[in-house]
Image (cartoon, rainbow, N blue to C red):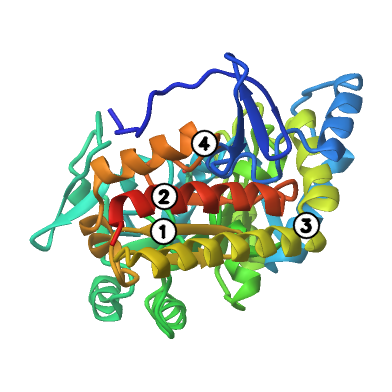
Amino acid sequence: MVKWPGPFPLYVDRAEGAHFTCADGVDHVDLCLGDTGAMTGHSPAATVARVREQVGRGITAMLPTADASVAAGELSRRFGLPQWQFTLSATDANRHVIRYARHLTGRPKVLVVDFCYHGSVDETFATLDGGEVVARRGNIGAPVPPSETTVVVPFNDVEALEAALAREDVACALLEPAMTNIGIVLPDDGYLAALRRLTAEHGTLLVLDETHTLCAGPGGCTAAWGLDPDVVVVGKTIGGGVPAGAFGLRADLSRRLLASVELEDVDLGGIGGTLAGNALSLAAVAATLTEVLTDDAFAHMEARAVEWTDGVQQVLDETGAPWHVTRLGCRAEYAFSPTAPHDGAEAAASDDFALQQHLHLHALNRGLLLTPFHNMALMSPATTPADVQQHTDAFRECATGLFAR
Ligand code: PLP
């Protein structure tokens, strides 16, 4: 069981924009937003209109619609990768990418960073224990020990990366450009450049999972920080709440995949899945990317996140709470340590479930839902300054109660 702070589940009767109403009629500011699935705000009008129209024109035919070009074209423009395959989720996308990376490189292993999360993908449920790769919570039913499939390194550790890649058995390095699933851990200056250089030197594909880090801007961290990955994975919010995932590839990689089909008679095996890229989800992705998650929307979302962060910092200053606040684009978080963590283990060390539950329950009682497992807030195009202020007021009240001097 994942520990979930609060009296869950809350049954949602209706969700709209940045709010939802529970079955008992209580309104909440939604700062969790479906853990990114609804970063667009709930039921964005343009997505809903296109989906309604598409429902009348057929939901799935296992053939692309014109929206496939619109959606893939928009992802290409944002992430600088020309070829995109749609899937039903980010988990699916990661699973396919790992298979293709193994096929393309002829290597067995996947490199991940300790305390990562990339969906329920067997290879990624591994952790370090005294330098050994061992199974991690969530690793159930895996057919082989994780040490046979996975290399694990701490985030921000260039030496460990270099040693791991030098063995030249790693098909792909799969990681978030900034960690978001153990709280937010930002990359050190130069870490991502070293990652790019070392993966290229050792023939390992660099896969950036931007499922959450799309919060950094319209083209995720890839565009915001000028990164140059071989593969990018996206999911969750790209369909405005309708299930969709995708991965983009460098042109030469997709050519090599196609060549193995055409020249070597290789069967790539269920690319994306039967319903992947169905007409409904492509309509949703095309509308969401072109009309909802626009540059203007991201500017609005980031402005709200800056207000949220400033409000939290002000309260930390007033109360002397020994915590810090971090922001990545429109996602922000406070954590129970005075300074920002440098890797997943440091971030995990500051976890305090009882304290977190106290803050979450206080927020819930003031009509606010934070992202469970973290003290994290996500802003949508529909989030208002008043929504943010409601959080600052509730946080001040709670932190003052804890740290009254
Ligand atoms: N990648 C990252 C970075 C994630 O955080 C998650 C889910 O939280 C996933 C992939 C899997 O997404 P989904 O559960 O929508 O397949």
Type of amino acid at the residue the image marks with label 4: Arg
Residue drawn where x is 29% and y is 74% of the image: 161
The residue under label 2 is: 375
Image depth: mark 4 or mark 2 in front: 4
**Which image quarter: residue 115?**
bottom left
Number of residues whose C-alpha sits closer than 10 Å to that of mark 3, classed few (under 14), some (14–19) or many (20 or more): some
Side of 14 where 227 appears, left or right: left
With respect to residue 295, does 382 lie above or below? above
Type of amino acid at the residue the image marks with label 2: Asn
The CA span between labels 1 and 2 is 6 Å
For ligand 1, tell me if the residue under mark 4 lies within 8 Å.
no
Res 297 label: 3
Type of amino acid at the residue the image marks with label 1: Tyr
Residues marked 4 and 3 touching at CB (< 8 Å) = no
Residue drawn where x is 28% and y is 62% of the image: 405
The residue under label 4 is: 366
Q: Circle 4 sits in a helix, a strand or a loop, which is it?
A: loop
Q: Circle 1 sits in a helix, a strand or a loop, which is it?
A: strand
Q: Circle 3 sits in a helix, a strand or a loop, which is it?
A: helix
Disc on the earlier residue, 3 or 2? 3
